[in-house]
Image: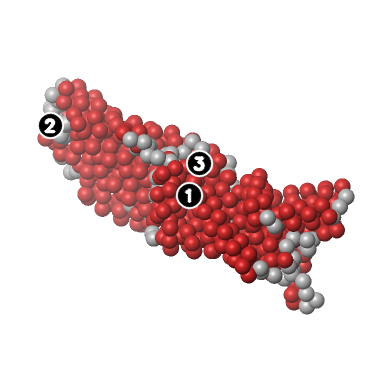
Amino acid sequence: MDLFDVLTLVGGLALFLFGMNIMGESLEKSAGGGLNRLLSKLTTGKLAGFLTGLGVTAVIQSSSATTVMVVGFVNSGIMTLKQAINVIMGANVGTTVTAWILSLTGIESSSLVVQLFKPTSFTPVLALAGIAMTMFAKKTKTKDIGTILLGFATLMFGMDTMSGAVSGLRDVPEFQNLLIMFQNPILGVLAGAVLTGIIQSSSASVGILQALSSTGAVTIGASIPIIMGQNIGTCVTALISSVGTNRNARRASLVHLSFNIIGTTVILIIYSIANAIFNFEIINNSANELSIAVCHTLFNVLCTVIMLPASGLLEKLSYKLIKEPAGDNAKEKKVELDERLMTTPAVAIDRCRKVSNTMAEVSVNSLRSSLRLLTEYDSEGAQQIAIDESAVDHYEDILGSYLVKLSTYPMSDSDSNEASKLLFVIGDLERISDHAMNILRSAQEIKDKSLEFTESAQAELKAIIGAVDEIVTLTLDAFVRGDAQAATLIEPLEQVVDVLKKQLRANHILRLQKGQCSIENGFVWSDILTNLERVSDHCSNIAVCIIEMAHDSMDIHQYLTRIKAGDPEFDRLFLEYSDKYILPANV
């Protein structure tokens, strides 16, 4: 093996790792909502958690990425440690899919049909199709599929290049002696762990081992301990990711390490004892891509069969190793938005959606409380509104920063649209809580100055408060459920609030002219009307955003122009709300 073979090997390895990376990212991006549906099963039982981990890892082709996600989930408080253990075990089995894909490079047959399944036969076609889709397709989804095909073709080309580059090693005595040394189980496990720890991908290190097997010098006996060590080395990524997280998140990464170390130790002991007794002849045979894939899968399945029933013991072990301190420090604040989830944008967007739903509920409840204080003031309610307003400001800060940073990651069109919608909406939600504070100040002024409104003014105030209370309720419901149909009910009601504001302001001027109302009352009255009308405006903004995003568009002006130009349903709803809230002219 000369210098040029070494350079070819390095180039093949680079292409292999690059292809695996872009294929995994594109698969994850393309999965989008499907990934979220898989992850929604996390709250169910042990088997469902295991299958979810298996499914997610099979989709994104990386157990390390799945485990990092799990650490982020536990750190955010959206997954318990017990649930995390089952998912981690599933991820270990899911990662074996890659080895089976790579085993296709070892297909050997004179049959034309079989040869067509060899990657060197079909990857050029995939690469051509992939580049055509990437360059000429207009839809992002099609471009993503093209990138997946290109990533797969690059991965397979890199694998084939590596195999060709190392073929000369079969005649190098030093290489053969090195592999003989790895037949020592301890050294083999260490070698697999170190290699995988360096490249932080068990799938990639198994692929490298499959490439080396093409020399014919790698025996099954040498490959088995290396495969076992690779499962330990892949824990490095999760351990690094857990730095700076809360105790449960660190326990999750420790469970991943414990699971693989204990599983490897148990199976290695059983394997060594069985081999000493029965002296398996098959382990002296040369390994190939298929046999390595079989060994990799068999080892991970056996590990799971042994350890899954003992998941409770793994949880207890993690608590022993990372103890819970006594006193107030035992309770840790959960991270609402964990940056570790950004590596899987579909999951991060789903988490942002849940946090924004909480923000919407706090904002709307704050507004409702402030409306109640206009007629029934109490100091505890006033204090809670101030607390809620501060919480909403916090949510806007963390969501805004998180979504902006998340936008730099590759996302599907639907996820990108969702991120844009959330960025648009959180500003309106924050402004609603600001208006709640403004209304609170008006309520405090009414109380402090002992102001009283006339009976007609009180009836008018009750009418517009009812309309605003209904519009914020409709908005919250439509936003939380993502219901575009429910959002269509909001704009007609917003128009009624506008009419009410003008009517109530005109009525107030008439009362001033008749001496029925003071100027001081008038200032407070004007402030209340302005804030209520602006709350309805923000509800309208949110509703329009929900509707337009449902149609993959953000043209708000076009939507408003269309519905106000004689839409029958809009007119019907406007009349219905008018009958409900607009008062007779003589009130």
Per the model, the C-alpha gap separating discs 3 and 1 is 12 Å
Q: Give residue 298's position: percent from left, percent from top.
A: 58, 65
Give whichever of 206, 141 is nearer the camera. Answer: 206
Count of labels shown? 3
The residue lying furthest to the front in this view is 277
Q: What type is the residue that disc 2 sits on?
A: Thr
Classed neighbour count for the residue bearing mark 3: other residues with Cα under 10 Å, few (<14), some (14–19), many (≥20): many
Quarter occupied by the C terminus: top left
Q: Which SS class for mark 1?
A: helix
User: Can you tell which quarter of the image residue 502 is in?
Assistant: top left
Residue positioned 25% across, 33% down in the render:
384
Which residue lies under the disc numbered 1?
255
Per the model, the C-alpha gap separating discs 3 and 2 is 63 Å
Classed neighbour count for the residue bearing mark 1: other residues with Cα under 10 Å, few (<14), some (14–19), many (≥20): many
With respect to residue 211, does 318 lie above or below? above
Is 299 situated left or right of 456 in this image? right
**Which numbered disc flags the more N-terminal residue, 2 or 1?**
1
User: Can you tell which quarter of the image residue 49 is in?
Assistant: bottom left
Which residue lies under the disc numbered 3?
242
Label 3 or label 2, whichever lies nearer to me, is: 3
With respect to residue 113, does 18 lie above or below? above
Q: What type is the residue that disc 3 sits on?
A: Ser
Disc 3 and disc 2 in contact, CB within 8 angstroms: no
Residue positioned 20% across, 42% down in the render:
463
Q: Give residue 287's position: percent from left, percent from top.
A: 72, 65
Q: What type is the residue that disc 1 sits on?
A: Val
Is 483 situated left or right of 261 in this image? left
Which residue lies under the disc numbered 2?
454
